[in-house]
Image: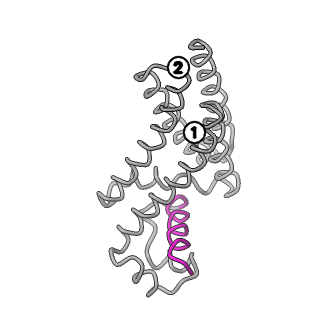
Amino acid sequence: MSRQQIVAGAADMIRRRGLNATSIREVAKHAGTPLGSTYHYFPGGKSQLATEAVQWASDTVQKVLAAKLRKGPIAGLQAFFALWRQIVTDTDFQAGCPVLAVAIEETADPQAVAAAAEAFRAWSELLENALKDHGVQAPRAKSLAQLVVAAAEGAVAMCRAQRGIQPLDDVAKELTALLESVIGART
């Protein structure tokens, strides 16, 4: 069992149960690794593991976004929403975003919360830069990028609560139309 598999397992548990309901013992069991190995790799305990799980999730989303944003902001937005759509449907609406789960956890370690803030900033910045590359002025590009990230996170939460994909599809459709109109007005 690799260290990376433990981190991915922690991210999966956090996105399903939340940070508070995820223990090191349960992560070890979920990842199929001895408890001692988990403590060996993560001497900082749950705080270190949560921080690294958030960073792993952030990096995973950034890779998807960066690849698709090369084709433009609309392709990036659609890939971002397709990723969340796949996560919520593949898990029968049991999993959302581990970054959001940590960000809203009242008792989360400050380092884990800082990692969550950095993840949201990084995702927004990727989208912002793509929008600027397509002629959208900096202040508007930044606010639109933050709107996309915030709307996606909220739509995922709604999908989980409603056990249906419609909120995510509706938000993706509306944001696509918005970005198309903004980019079209600039070209």
Residue 15 is situated, as x and y percent measured from the top left of the image, at 53, 58
Check disc 2 and report its element: helix, strand or loop. loop
Residue 185: x percent and y percent? Answer: 58, 12
Residue at the image position 42 percent from the left and 23 percent from the top: 138
Residue type, numbered disc 1: Ala
The residue carrying mark 1 is: 155
* Render colour scheme: one colour
Crowd around label 2: few <14 · some 14–19 · many ≥20 (10 Å): some
Quadrant of the rendered image containing residue 184: top right
Question: Residue at 57% across / 39% down in the picture?
Answer: 155
Q: Which residues are magenta?
A: 1-16
Query: Which residue is label 2 attached to?
Result: 135
Q: Is residue 12 magenta?
A: yes
**Residue at image point 63% right, 25% down:** 174
Q: Where is residue 107? Give x, y as percent.
A: 32, 59
Which of the two discs, 2 and 1, labels the residue nearer the N terminus? 2
Tell me where residue 18 appears, x and y as whole percent.
Answer: 47, 59
Above or below 29: residue 21: above
Say whether residue 71 is left or right of residue 152: right
Mark 2 to mark 1: distance in Å?
27 Å
In this view, the residue in front, 148 or 2, is 2
The residue under the point 68% across, 35% down is: 169
Placement of the N terminus among the 4 image quadrants: bottom right
Q: Closer to the camera, 46 or 125?
A: 125
Q: Secondary structure at mark 1?
A: helix
Image quarter hosting the C terminus: top right
Look at label 2 and name its amino acid. Answer: Gly
